[in-house]
Image: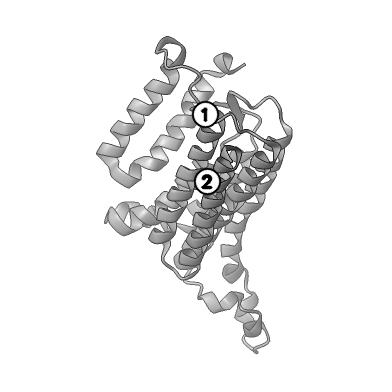
Amino acid sequence: MKKHIPNLVTLLNLFSGCVAAIFVIQGQLAWGAVFVFLGIFFDFMDGLLARALDARSELGLQLDSLADVVTSGVVPGLVLYKLLALALNVPDEMIDPGHWSDDNSSAFSMVNLLPLVGLIVPMSSAYRLGRFNLDEEQQHFFKGLPTPANALLIMSLPLILEFQDSDVINAQILNPVLLIVLAIASAYLLNAPVRLFSLKFRSFDFASNILRYLFLIISLILLLVFHFAGIPLIIILYVLMSLANQKQLH
């Protein structure tokens, strides 16, 4: 019975991602972010439970990646689509095939199709997860940015818009050029041939985990000071600290 517990938690990750997708499609991006964060929590817990219960399996590995494609791939892609549509003033009906039969040729303009750039994220996330399942090296480190980390970065944007109330920050988040750059940068970072440290603790010894402890302490400070706006800073910090410690990750 215990071998099924981690898989059940993985399915809760998938369920959370599906609920998040419904909220995002309805335009409720902040609620979508809440359920993606919940899904990422379940994603963390399923691995923890699998190790604690000695219930790791090939099925669990595949289920985990399938759930992550939705929660940490499809939903962030939809959020980028929605943010780009908002930034470019593109109405939702522009992607309705029924609208394309109208005489209004503006439905085919490049500007109205630009929000689809956000869908680069689920494609690159799926590719990254497929590679991860075939790579036996990634036990104590990651090659490329983990999909949950990329999802946290993207899903923090609607939360910043909703709760930070900063005209300067909001203007940057709704800058279509920056959103397109973010989509392309995500695709690269997810599959970059760079090693990033894992937050899995094999022991709680300070000396052997100093990088992890330092990252967690600074991350907590960033969240306390910048609130939701601290999440993108934490992901940037994670990448920079990994790049600065490449020798330790080999």
Label number found at residue 52: 1
Label number found at residue 134: none
The amino acid sitting under disc 1 is: Ala
Q: Residue furthest top?
A: 207
Q: Earlier in the sequence, mark 2 or mark 1?
A: 2
Q: Residues within 10 Å of mark 2 (few under 14, many from 20)?
A: many
In this rendering, is residue 123 above or below 98?
A: above
Which residue: 42% across, 62% down?
29
The amino acid sitting under disc 2 is: Val
- Where on the picture, by quarter, is residue 96? bottom right
Report the quarter where the C terminus lies. Answer: top right
Q: Nearer the viewer, residue 44 or 23?
A: 44
| Residue 31 horizontal/vertical position (percent) | 39, 60
Mark 1: secondary structure? helix
Which residue: 44% across, 55% down?
35
Mark 2: secondary structure? helix
- Where on the picture, by quarter, is residue 62? top right
In this rendering, is residue 104 above or below 74?
A: below
Q: Nearer the viewer, residue 53 or 105?
A: 53
**Position of residue 147 in the picture relative to residue 206 (left or right):** right
| Residue 239 horizontal/vertical position (percent) | 50, 31
Query: In this figure, which residue is indicated by the disc labeled 2?
Result: 9
Calculate the distance from the C-alpha at mark 2 to the C-alpha at mark 1.
14 Å
| Residue 103 horizontal/vertical position (percent) | 65, 89
In this rendering, is residue 152 above or below 241?
A: below
Q: Residue furthest bottom?
A: 103
Report the quarter where the N terminus lies. Answer: top right
Which residue: 42% across, 59% down?
174
